[in-house]
Amino acid sequence: MSDSPAATATDLEPDEAPSPLKQPEFVKLLAISITVALGFGMVVPVLALYAESFGVSLAAIGLVQLTFGLTRFGFGLVGGLVVDRFGERTCTIAGLLIVSASAYAAGFAETFGQFVVARGVGGAGSALFMAGLMNRILRIVEPAAMGRATGQFRSSFLVGIALGPFLGGLAASSFGLAAPFYFYATGLLVAAVIAWFAMRRGAEIRATEKRSPLQALAAARPLLADRRYIAALGATFVGWWSLSGPAQTIGPLFAKSELGFTENQIGVAVTMLAVGEILILLLVAGRASDRYGRRAVLVPSLAATAVATALMGQIDTASWAYFPTMVAIGAGVAAGGAAAGGLLADAIPREGSGAAVGVNQMAGDLGYLISPALIGLVAQHLGFGAAYLVGAVPAAIVLFLAVRLLPRGTRRERSELAVEAH
């Protein structure tokens, strides 16, 4: 396995690469992200309540999110292959329209079964439009600026997710539990219109690069021998594993049962998680990844995630430590995500690979799906301390891979590559 640096060395020094925000198309893609995240956030506070209105059990309510997650995971690679065959613009718009239709269907559902099916279809559409957006970002942003682009893209989604629940609660209280789904669906139609106009540039170029599914998979296969791509997959898995299990699902249970936190205190702690993500993305991680190299950011971010996750389960009387620990997990996950985006840009050829991006998306979805159940099972049988130690294991494993990366992005590495090329 190699880093394969010569094939994808960046064309610009990190400090010479233009900011992604100076590209009008990238800014418009951020507008799509915020619109989608805002609508998604609106349905978060009413999802369980709306499912409960059909008169089903608590276990059945969990089926809604499971169905969404499984279909999104199952269509991760499919979305990438659609990009390779039909282009980013087509894939993005198709995905947005599918999710819009599913949100309308969820709002109009008359039975719980219809609601579950609607959410499942939404998961498939989500995989499609995310594959289209991420592939387009990789194509239009210089690799030397990809750390910043990843941070800005993720920050835009976090902003929408943060504002959405408040607006969703207002809509539900004023117009009923189905209202947030209608607002979400309509917002997705707006996002599809933005994508239609924003992604026109390059559509003609993409039309000449169509690949069949077999051709796309064959083109992506060499990346499985590239340490940068494998490290990116690992970091993506760790990020969603750490958020969904230790922080968002098991965290509130631990805080309530072991630390005696109230609902308000738990809410503040979850907010601290998002604060850690946004601050590290906007202020440090993206630019540092571009200037000092992916390894320089990925190694400390994984170490912080592993240590903070392991320590969280050991908190006993010092309950105040729960808050900075949540900030540390959020910051570690965010920094790792910025570095992973840069690694993808370094590893994937500039002509793009929807299949490769789709597999990366599946890695995140896999972590998001299995972490809550697995860590919850350990907590039930062995206690929270053991559960959080298990939760830290993926970050520790990927940390071992990350330290073996070349210091990509540094001037020393590029000078060495130039010497090797001659």
Image (cartoon, grey):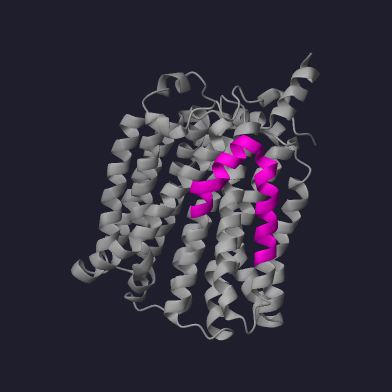
Q: Residue furthest left?
A: 174
Q: Position of residue 376 (x, y in %)?
A: 62, 74
Dividing the picture into quadrants, the one containing residue 201 is: top left
Q: Position of residue 311 (x, y in %)?
A: 68, 71
Q: Nearer the viewer, residue 259 or 178?
A: 259
Q: Nearer the viewer, residue 107 or 18?
A: 18
Q: At 68% across and 54% down in the image, what residue appears? A: 302
Q: At 69% across and 28% down in the image, what residue appears? A: 411
Which residue range is magenta in the image? 279-308
| Image: 348 above or below 36 | above
Q: Position of residue 109 (x, y in %)?
A: 30, 63
Instruction: Check residue 281 for magenta coloring.
Output: yes
Q: Residue furthest top?
A: 422
Using residue 417 as the reference point, say whether residue 143 is left or right of it. left
Which of the image's four quarters has the C terminus? top right
Q: Evaluate whether residue 109 shows in this view.
A: no
Instruction: Check residue 97 for magenta coloring.
Output: no
Using residue 375 as the reference point, say whether residue 187 is left or right of it. left
| Image: 346 above or below 172 | above
Q: Position of residue 139 (x, y in %)?
A: 51, 28
Using residue 117 as the reference point, say whether residue 284 is left or right of it. right
Could you tell me what secondary structure mostly forms the magenta stretch?
Answer: helix
Q: Nearer the viewer, residue 269 or 36?
A: 269
